[in-house]
Image (tube, helix red, strand yellow):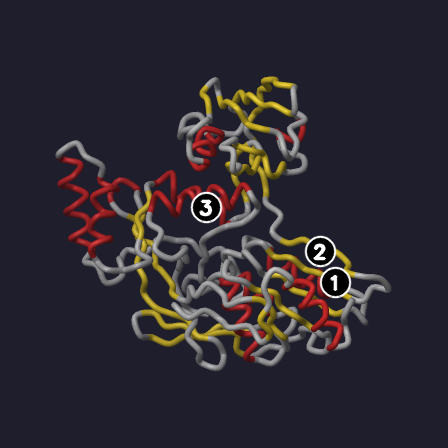
Amino acid sequence: MPGHTYQVKPRGIHRGAALTLVFASVLATAAATGSLPREGDAATEIRARSVSSTVGSVDREEIEDAVADAEADGKSGTDAAEEVVSRSGDRWGAVYDEREYEDFEQALDGSYTGVGISARRSARGAVTVTGVQPGGPADAAGVRKGDLLRTVDGRSVGGRPVAEVVALLRGDRTEAAEGTAVVLGLSRGDHSWTTTLHRARLHTQPVSVRQLGEDPAAVLIKVSAFTKGAGSAVREAVDEAPGDAGILLDLRANSGGLVTEAVTASSAFLDGGLVATYDVHGEQRALYAEAGGDTERPVVVLVDGGTMSAAELLTGALQDRGRAVTVGSRTFGKGSVQMPSKLPGGSVAELTVGHYRTPAGRSVEGSGITPDVGAGPEAQKRAETVLSGLGGGS
């Protein structure tokens, strides 16, 4: 399937904020960007992150001149490029320095270098560990969910944004390599201690599978992001599900990922056919599922306002093709595609170059996907009821 490389990022988020989201998402086993394949790649392949020599609708020379002028004045070329992109009016346009873009690349591959901790700031202001990746450095050191993170390398995390805390955990460019040390100050109840961890290359687990009910009556497949291998993992989960089990495909809070992985996932439920169309500077192209998917098993898709980009593409395909009932709340509405372009000095600019549509020709951008059955806090329970009514319930 001909094409280039495209990235998808959250609404209105530029370099710093987008990076914050990606750091948090990666540590929580998710990714906030997405790609379509480059020229010559099949729709199900994934090595799709070469860098273009053009920059969307913004004149490349204008950006290069801005970078050169800024660097000549001893200023940041990345910041200068970001200013030009911001003036373009592209709500999804963004600029990343070389390190930041490498982080996105790793995130799309489903890996990152770190200690295996996800964290958030509680209502009381403390930084609380919300997850520990099994087998990671933090797990091996005995760090547990619910522990409070007090310091990183002797620096207090009190009052710092969580994104800044994550940056301290990762270290700067020279400190963030595998095997480098970071000292954490932690507390659990009345016990406080410090521990030295060594950063490692960790792999995210974007797909989880569990049985709902007995016999089994249904299988829940949760996809947190479409990083490398997620599509195949979905197909494997469907293939291994008992023949009489319905599938509850949970795409809530799925911030997207590699579009090719979403297409692969669609092939678990479709016997070939159209998944989506998209345009690049007005040129129309299409994405197709592979033949041989399970077209008989009952399927319900759970979505919410955090269901984005590649996850919306999959949702729209299954809905339009009559292959699944969708339950939840309206999805985010991210249906545009961006092309990355390498700039002098190694930074990368991304601008919108087109949009995709569902098989029925619906645009997702700005409007999202309205589920067949609306549901709020009890969405999963409602989805299980719907699945039961389809003959595969719990």
Q: Which of the two labelled residues, at mark 2 and mark 3, occupies the earlier sequence position?
A: 3
Residues at marks 1 and 3, CA–CA distance in whole angstroms: 29 Å
Residue annotated with mark 1: 219
Residue 106: percent from the left, percent from the top?
48, 44
Residue 287: percent from the left, percent from the top?
49, 72
Whether residue 257 can be seen here: no
370 versus 203 height, above or below: below
- Type of amino acid at the residue the image marks with label 2: Val
342 versus 88 height, above or below: above
Which SS class for mark 2? Answer: strand
Which SS class for mark 1? Answer: strand
Q: Which mark is residue 150?
A: none
Q: Which of the two labelled residues, at mark 1 and mark 2, occupies the earlier sequence position?
A: 2
- Asked whether the residues under the numbered discs 1 and 2 touch, taking CB atoms below 8 Å apart as contact, a structural biologist would say yes
Residue annotated with mark 3: 22
Residue annotated with mark 2: 209
